[in-house]
Amino acid sequence: MAERQVRAVISGRVQGVWYRAWTRKEAQRRGLNGWVRNRKDGTVEAVFAGDAKAVDEMLAACREGPPQAVVAEVEIEPWSGALQPGFQQLPSA
């Protein structure tokens, strides 16, 4: 099983539409570790770590988001920081 860790920054109408809670639920369903938080610039930032296929599926889901979101872009970059087990919703940064 190949592992993958990425940082994603999601832009568009992604705050005030339950994007963070939706992300947490979807990531937990896929057994991923990481976190999600709102940023002051109006984007949502997330780190996903786990099985490469599950991470890829999560990134594809992020391009759609929850029903009220309008995703304009998902920027992805490799990430190598330490993570706690599980997936958390963090306070805004």
Image (spheres, helix red, strand yellow):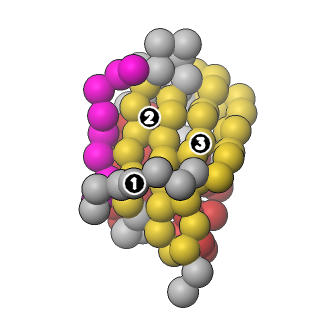
Q: Residue 25: tell me if it is visible.
A: no
- Choose the circle earlier in sequence order: 1 or 2: 2
Q: CA distance from mark 1 to mark 2?
A: 24 Å
Residues at circles 3 and 2 in contact by the CB criterion of under 8 Å: no
Q: CA distance from mark 3 to mark 1?
A: 16 Å
Establish if 48 lies above or below 10: below
- The residue segment tinted magenta is 86-93
Q: Which residue is mark 2?
A: 19
Establish if 28 lies above or below 69: below
Q: Label 3: few (<14), some or many (≥20) within 10 Å?
A: many
Left/right placement of residue 61 relative to residue 32 reads right
Q: Which residue is mark 3?
A: 8
Q: CA distance from mark 3 to mark 2?
A: 13 Å
- Dominant secondary structure of the magenta stretch? loop
- Choose the circle earlier in sequence order: 3 or 2: 3
Mark 2 lies on a secondary structure that is helix
Q: Which residue is mark 1?
A: 82
- Residue 55's disc is none
Residues at circles 1 and 2 in contact by the CB criterion of under 8 Å: no
- Type of the residue with mark 1: Ala
As for residue 31 lying within the magenta part, the answer is no
- Choose the circle earlier in sequence order: 3 or 1: 3
